[in-house]
Image (tube, helix red, strand yellow):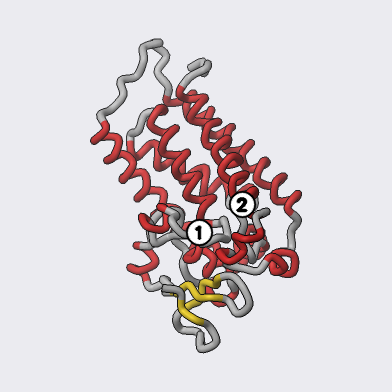
């Protein structure tokens, strides 16, 4: 199939544009000092704990997105219809069902692949530890991974979600743009009031921040939507959002001594 200016092209490139636009929004908010009261880590911790520069993160994400584009265009070319007729689009109800299936497939694939990369010491040391070099996550670092991890978790996981759900390329534009927004939001490092994603999903920036800390390295593997597999398989670490001594917020496991913190209602 010859891919022109089509749903296939939009399904490939729109989520990438969404990634940088939504990350850019959080980057702009990061410059607003009065929002520091909603940060999950003090500003100075990013420099002190992260062992990779922001420039290296940008280059790493762009590399992954090149692989993502190549796989996406290849997939569309293989499964595409050559007869030139426009594909019939599903009803809103069918689209919602496809979204639900795709979310389940993506969560299931990423949970087990992600968890295995922690269990297998070789894979963690040589592959997954690259993502965990961001101890203090931030928005555009959401897809900062080793290229092999990006291929396995994100690209293949996305392809499986697309194929198993049976969604059309046009529906995939919406689904993968939403999944991108969710992933960026989970790494934003902020706990902003009124964030609708926090109201809809227990898998959020605070939940994922726990996983990026040393004490949470063996917990909270689920991403990007729900926490069901963590709860079913006993890897869920409950947490609370606390006022940090000094300024800001902190996501802390409820098992830790939090006597020095004041709980946020």
Q: Are marks 1 and 2 in contact (CB under 8 Å)?
A: yes
- Residue at x 36% of width, y 44% of height: 102
Which quadrant would the C terminus be assigned to in this image?
A: bottom left
Picture coordinates of residue 115, whole percent (x, y): 49, 63
Q: Earlier in the sequence, mark 1 or mark 2?
A: 2
The residue depicted at 38 percent of the width and 36 percent of the height is: 163
As drawn, the label of residue 29 is: 2
Q: Position of residue 159 (x, y in %)?
A: 45, 39
How many other residues sit within 10 Å of disc 2, few (<14), some (14-19) or many (≥20)? some
Numbered mark located on residue 265 in the image: none
Q: Residue furthest top?
A: 84
Please tell me which residue is depicted at 46% across the width and 59% down the height of the picture: 193
Image position of 254 with respect to 161: above or below: below
Residue 89 in the image: above or below residue 86 = below
Element type at mark 2? helix
- Residue 141 appears in the rendering: yes
Residue 138: image location, x then y, percent: 62, 56
- Please give left or right for residue 206 compared with residue 140 in the image: left
Which residue, given by chain and number where applicable, does mark 1 sit on? 192
């Amino acid at each position: 199939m010859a891919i022109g200016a089509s749903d296939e092209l939009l399904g490939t490139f729109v989520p990438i544009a969404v990634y940088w636009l939504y990350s850019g929004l959080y980057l702009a908010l990061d410059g607003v000092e009065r929002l520091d009261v909603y940060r999950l880590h003090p500003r100075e911790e990013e420099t002190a704990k992260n062992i990779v520069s922001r420039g290296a993160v940008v280059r790493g994400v762009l590399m992954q997105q090149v692989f993502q584009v190549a796989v996406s265009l290849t997939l569309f070319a293989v499964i595409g219809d050559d007869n030139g007729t426009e594909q019939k689009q599903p009803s809103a109800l069918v689209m919602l069902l496809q979204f639900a299936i795709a979310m389940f497939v993506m969560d299931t694939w990423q949970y087990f692949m992600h968890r295995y990369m922690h269990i297998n010491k070789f894979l963690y040391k040589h592959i997954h530890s690259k993502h965990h070099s961001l101890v203090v996550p931030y928005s555009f670092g959401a897809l900062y991974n080793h290229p092999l991890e990006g291929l396995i978790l994100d690209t293949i996981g996305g392809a499986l979600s697309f194929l198993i759900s049976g969604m059309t390329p046009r529906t995939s534009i919406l689904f993968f743009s939403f999944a991108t927004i969710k992933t960026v939001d989970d790494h934003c490092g902020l706990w902003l009031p009124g964030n609708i994603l926090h109201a809809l999903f227990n898998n959020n920036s605070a939940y994922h921040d726990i996983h990026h800390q040393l004490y949470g390295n063996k917990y909270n593997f689920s991403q990007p939507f729900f926490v069901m597999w963590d709860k079913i398989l006993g890897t869920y670490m409950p947490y609370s959002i606390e006022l940090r001594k000094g300024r800001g917020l902190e996501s802390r496991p409820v098992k830790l001594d939090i006597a020095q913190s004041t709980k946020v209602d």
